[in-house]
Image (tube, grey):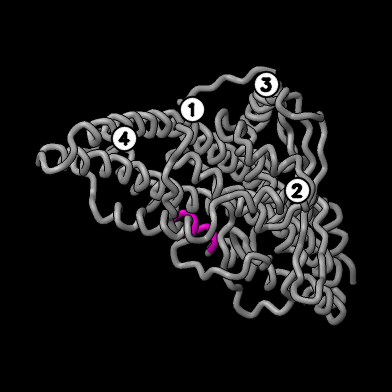
Amino acid sequence: MSRTIDAVVSPTQTNTIPADISGQMLDLDEDDDLEVFSKDSTLADGNMFNASMPTSPGSMVNQCKFEEDEESDSKDIFITVDNPESHVTAIETFITYRVLTKTTRSEFDNSEYEVRRRYQDFLWLKGKLEDAHSTLIVHPLPEKFVVKGMVERFNGDFIETRRKALHKFLNRVADHPILSCSEDFKVFLSAQAWELTTYKKQGPGFLSRMGETVRAVANSVRWVKNRPEEFTAIQEYVEDFSNKIGSLDKVTQRIVKEQKEYLEELKEYGPTYTLWSGSEEELAEQLKGVAGCMERCCKETEEQVGHLSDTLVPVLHEYVLCAETLKAVLRRRDIIQAEFEAKNEALATKKVDRDALKEEIDKLEDRVEWANNALKGDWGRWQRSMRGDLKSAFLSTAEKNVDYYEKCLAVWETFLLSQRTEPSEETDRDNTP
């Protein structure tokens, strides 16, 4: 199936410009399995909706689902990450995940593949994509950090959180018109473990990577002088977006934490009313009814908190990481332009071989143009993706909140109706000696 390429193809050679986008996170060994978006959150697989949540046929959520179904008709590669397995050796313990791929693309020898990958393989793929396409937006992986007080290293919740994050990462790459055509991506999906290990060894050695790092640091000292206005506007947008999404992320996580604490206290209400009913014969029926209402509301509250943790929190934090990725991409674009400007300045001084430098400047000019066009094309794609993801998460959260309060209201209304008595019954009760 043919794909529409809506951005400029990368040059055959690009400088590797490492950028640390992990912020204040503490890196661990590659085999550590505690990289998660949030300690108490999990990622939703592509779909931001709870299938069990009742929605009307004309609801906004269902309309979004229909639009997603239409888009899926044009896909020609489908990837699933599942079935995590723990591996224990004499020197390490690590988790691998099954990666299932189904595709109709002609560049693949088969239509289906099944391989196992560990987290460091995903890190390798992300690094290769960023090296080859320095001004394309590669979807972030969950950051590495140490969870204080974590006793069990490979906790099931963390493994599942990572699995969902890796699933989303690969499908983001698969949906990208340029990144999905990468030979590294193809090898990642199709090669067996030993083949992938061999393929990795074909990359640049340590000294080469170190040299590239040194050059990148040196280049970063010179800052761009004449950045195009459109990229200045993008940078200002990203800074503003980063601040706002960061604030939303922190507030939402704090709300979820408080809701969980409230839920734990709420769970004590039902048993308390039940115990009370044993010592109040005349109020026993009402107290047991209140206890039943509290238990049902507790169940609904637990679902509502779970929905926030599983749907809204991970999406917000995901785009906190995306903002850092965008900042790194913009820095790399500026470095490319700064190098071009520096060569032009050298040419103006007439202290170098003008012909040789002019040829190098022409190549740098082409590279700057490619970097600008690639970033502009990817910027539009990223904005559409971001707005779609956030819109889906907000709509789903709004409908879940409405559903939650309606159910709790119905519980208490039913209780009130059950306590209503007819006038004749009240009269008989008053006349009872």
Amino acid bearing label 3: Ser
Reading the chain from its start, which is encountered first: label 2 or label 1?
1
Location of the N terminus by quadrant is top right
- Residue at point 52% right, 60% down? 206
Amino acid bearing label 2: Glu
Q: Are marks 4 and 1 in contact (CB under 8 Å)?
A: no
Spatial separation of the CA atoms under disc 4 and disc 2: 36 Å
Label 1 sits on a secondary structure element that is loop
Q: Which residue is mark 3?
A: 74
Label 4 sits on a secondary structure element that is helix
Reading the chain from its start, which is encountered first: label 4 or label 2?
2
In percent of width and height, residue 360 lies at 29, 35
Residue 404 makes an appearance in the image: no
Residues 263 and 91: in front is 91
Q: Main secondary structure of the magenta part?
A: helix
Q: Nearer the viewer, mark 4 or mark 1?
A: 4
Q: Are marks 3 and 1 in contact (CB under 8 Å)?
A: no
Amino acid bearing label 4: Leu
Q: Are marks 2 and 1 in contact (CB under 8 Å)?
A: no
Q: Which residue is mark 4?
A: 364
Crowding at dot 2, Cα within 10 Å, few <14 / some 14-19 / many 20+, comes out as few
Q: Are marks 2 and 3 in contact (CB under 8 Å)?
A: no
Amino acid bearing label 1: Val
- Residue at point 71% right, 30% down? 77
Dividing the picture into quadrants, the one containing residue 347 is: top left
Q: Which residue is mark 1?
A: 9
Spatial separation of the CA atoms under disc 4 and disc 3: 36 Å
Q: Is residue 90 left or right of residue 184?
A: right
Q: Is residue 388 left or right of residue 378?
A: right
